[in-house]
Image (cartoon, rainbow, N blue to C red):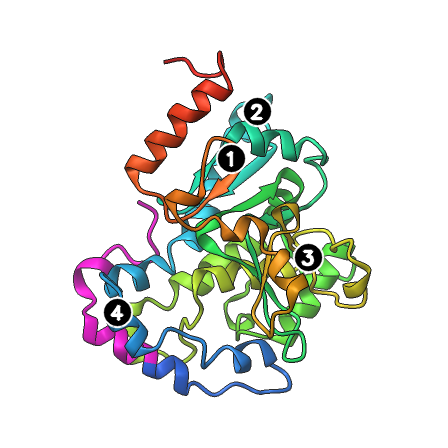
Amino acid sequence: MDDADKLCHSNLTVVDTHMISDWCKARKWNPRRQKLMATHRMPYASKNWLKNKTNPVGWMCAQARPTVAFPALLRKYQSEMETRPKNTLPDYVLVLDDDTYYNMEMVGQYLKQYDAETPRAIAGCMVRSPIWLIHYTIPFGGFGLIMSRGALKNFMKPVNCSSTVKDEFSESACRRLKDNQIDEEAYFRDGMSVSELMETYTSSQPYRLHHNWTIGYCLHSDWMWGFFINYYNISKHVDDPFYKNVVQSRMDGYNGSEIYAGENNRKEIEQRKICNNDSPRKCNATTPICHYQTPASMERLTEEAKAVYPGRFTS
């Protein structure tokens, strides 16, 4: 298991999670220069919210896992390409929870409309912050995140801020580092890729050592994906003309599926689409993506899919 801290699950206590919550909610950020974190102090997991979790320690430890496991996966791909020149990056990488169901026949057909070489990040269900507060989008983790080969390449590119000659991607990344939105600049070393920066930021601040925190790790895992994908130009800019002047609008929802975290009118409610598939009873063989599934519901969906797509299953 690729964990930022392999002792997190065994050594962290429920009391620790409450102390971390207090620390993160009290953490001071520059409201003008670091608006993202300044606006996300209060939404951070509260003690009452954690008390209602079946396993608050497990939940908290899991928040650091994806952004450590993902760079490890990219290193594996890089190593394979170096030792086996014919190997290439996959068309897409999917990041899913263990209670997420993807109908790969439907999702595969959906992705055929895109060129995998184009940097693209697609949230199964995207969550948009109130635009009057901040322009920020994240994937709703349980509905998954799809990243194209072009996006993977951007995550893997070395960033050399000391160089006098930089490509457009490095130029923008170096500008973001100076913005220092989440205090990530302290962890950057010249030549790092964005995925390595993301990994170092996460793993350098283990939850077990929260008593010694100076910067802290005060992000939910979905927030981390949203930050690095949008702010570090991992994905192409969205096509929606409404957000054409918002530089960090770089995530799409699957088939436009989106939850708006502000006041909802009829349009916002209708735009939820995939986001409504949040229980076993709402999903069937023709549903592309579902969250909050059980082992039994996944078996049922698979059996239903076999009937819809005969010949596509080996057993």
Label 3 to label 1: alpha-carbon separation: 24 Å
Residue labelled with disc 2: 87
**Which callout, 2 or 4, points to the residue nearer the camera?**
4
Label 4 to label 1: alpha-carbon separation: 39 Å
Label 2 to label 4: alpha-carbon separation: 46 Å
Label 4 to label 3: alpha-carbon separation: 33 Å
Position of the N terminus by quadrant: top left
Q: Earlier in the sequence, mark 2 or mark 4?
A: 4
Percent coordinates x, y for residue 235 in the rendering:
67, 51
Cβ–Cβ below 8 Å for labels 2 and 1? yes
Percent coordinates x, y for residue 228 in the rendering:
58, 60
Residue labelled with disc 1: 77
Q: Earlier in the sequence, mark 2 or mark 1?
A: 1
Residue labelled with disc 4: 52
Q: Is residue 310 above or below residue 149?
A: above
Secondary structure under tag 3 reads loop
CA neighbours of label 2 inside 10 A, class few (<14), some (14 to 19), many (20+): few
Q: Is residue 179 above or below residue 287?
A: below
**Which callout, 4 or 1, points to the residue nearer the camera?**
4
**Which callout, 3 or 2, points to the residue nearer the camera?**
3
Label 2 to label 1: alpha-carbon separation: 8 Å
CA neighbours of label 3 inside 10 A, class few (<14), some (14 to 19), many (20+): many
Secondary structure under tag 2 reads loop
